[in-house]
Amino acid sequence: MVNKNLKTEFSSKMEIVQCLVEEWGESADGFYNSSTNKHVEKFWTYNRTLQYLFKLRREYVRTEHGRMHKSLYYAQ
């Protein structure tokens, strides 16, 4: 069951992060360097961030309390 309204093509990491913030309630700060955490941006590359978004869409559902793995959600 794929939602046709979800954006699947992105031209920058910033667009992917914005989508994660809007769709999943993620914090944008977690994908970029901060003054105390310099290695974050090296980990969250464009491709890794995109794959994370697609994994959330594929394996999780949004609930009123956050997110839940689909296997647990549909088992209820």
Image: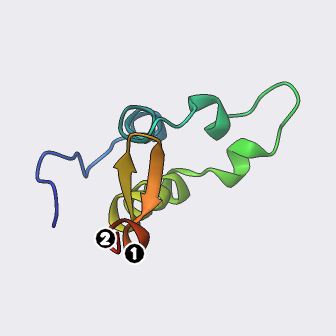
Structure colour scheme: rainbow
Q: Residue 30 location in percent, x, y?
A: 66, 37
Examine the image and state in which quarter residue 12 appears: top left
**Residue where numbered disc 1 is placed:** 71
Asked which secondary structure carries label 1, the reply is: helix
8 over 73 or under it: above or below: above
Q: Which mark is residue 35?
A: none
Examine the image and state in which quarter residue 2 appears: bottom left
Q: Residue at x 26, y 49 (%)?
A: 9
Q: Residues within 10 Å of mark 2 (few under 14, many from 20)?
A: few
- In the rendered image, the quadrant that contains the C terminus is bottom left
Apparent side of residue 34 relative to residue 31 in the rendered image (left or right): right
Apparent side of residue 36 relative to residue 16 in the rendered image (left or right): right
Comparing 16 with 22, the one in front is 22
Q: Residue 34 location in percent, x, y?
A: 78, 28
Q: Are marks 2 and 1 in contact (CB under 8 Å)?
A: yes
Comparing 8 with 25, the one in front is 25
Q: Residue 44 location in percent, x, y?
A: 62, 50
Comparing 55 with 35, the one in front is 55
**Residue where numbered disc 2 is placed:** 74
